[in-house]
Image (cartoon, grey):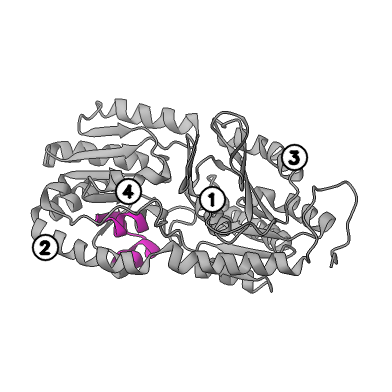
Amino acid sequence: MIVDADMITTAHWRLRAPAVATVNRTVCVPTVHPVGDRRVLRCAQAVLDDGFDVHLIWLGGEPGESRPHPRVRETRLPEPTSARQRLRLVPAVVRAAERVPADLWHIHDYYLLPHARRWSRRTGRPVLYDVHEYYPEYYSQRFTAPSFVQDAGRRLVAGVEQYYAGRLGGANAVSEQLADRFRALGLPAVATPNYPSVDAFARPPRPLTPDLLRRVVHTGSLTTDYGADVLVGLAVELRRLAPEVEVLAVSRFPSEAARRRFGEAVERAGRPANLRMLDPVPAHEVADLLATCGIGLSLMQDVGEARLSVNSKFYEYAIMGLAVVTSDLPAARHFVERSAAGRCVPPARPDRFARAITDLIADAEATCEAVNRAAARARDELSWERTCAPRLRALVRDLVGRAGGVPGQVVGSTSVTANRS
């Protein structure tokens, strides 16, 4: 851990040290997301800059508690090796959150909704629900089942989400469409897309040049739904079509099973030499990696919420001046047409992904010109600090203000009246 006048840096994450005085109010951030999650950090920075203290509770790193800054506390729980183990850690996250004398809980998981409702009811303190995904669509298609079963699952997940979230303080959603779902419940809601943070992407822009197009990068999770098999297949195709092109992939696996499946796919493909795996990259180092590459990949398959969502890496690729090659899904296509430059191809066709890459390289001058033009616009428009942080801070201030002036407390076993002023 390093603490200086400007930055708070640990082994897994970095925040900017607050320049404003504390208001002596604590925002507790419990989540089953991994330590260093980018959205969690961006949200924490926003409230830290507004005078709130922050207590982060998440999974991974060396288990334990630390205080890397007088205004920031951290509780780290064991890193899960599977989705099932992640769910089993929910009670531990809940217990840790209940020990924090919070003025507001900012939860980042659907799984925490019932617990959050209980915290709010017992203490009179607000809970802000951070909506990372289109959860009804996401969860209803996680398992193979007839469409009528998936539709029933979607309605069930939506009903649970609406029941609990509608009784909390507010929602912070990754898109306007998601925010509208919660506004329809009468809940205060803001949209804060996963635009990059200026702290993590502060390096001066570099122009895209033809030589960089021969370095292709994938920074997202490597699962079947996120196109892990397609990644291996396109590396094989590129080895044949353009052996000089290098494919870089960050080793982001949500479970050991996903890691094993990917390794088996690489072995079956003969371990293509042009596919280079990178160690996980902290959020504040992603920009340095992207600056060395010219084409960014998104390989989402047409499942779950894929037609609706725009992943964080799209924004990062765009502002760093990479051409985007992505699955041809509605939200992705809209983003590329409006805010980036690149190609959209059928999701399950590694040959088409490889051909799109070689086409961009073959027309390098036009590619670089279009990307550089789009990148300048993206840096102006896709700003977390200018667009998202003010919305989030205003909502948090409003929710804490409604709760009255009494400092936060731990969750007790008996109810506390909601009117504490």
Number of the front mark, 2 or 4: 4
Q: Mark 2 points at which residue?
A: 366
Q: Which amino acid does label 4 sit on?
A: Ala
Q: Which amino acid does label 3 sit on?
A: Arg
Q: Residue at x 56, y 31 (%)?
A: 79
Q: Earlier in the sequence, mark 2 or mark 4?
A: 4
Q: Which is nearer the eye, 9 or 116?
A: 9
Q: Which residue is drawn at 20% across and 43% down?
A: 215
Quarter of the image for residue 43 reads bottom right
Q: Mark 3 points at which residue?
A: 95
Q: Which is nearer the eye, 181 or 296?
A: 296
Categorize mark 3 by other alpha carbons within 10 Å: few (<14), some (14-19), many (20+).
Answer: few
Q: How far apart are marks 2 and 1 (CA)?
A: 37 Å
Number of the front mark, 2 or 1: 1
How far across and down, in percent of the image, does residue 127 sit? Answer: 70, 58
Q: How far apart are marks 4 and 1 (CA)?
A: 18 Å
Residue segment shown in magenta: 315-336
Q: Name the residue under label 1.
A: 40
C-beta proximity under 8 Å, tags 4 and 1: no
Q: Distance between the residues labelled 3 and 2?
A: 56 Å
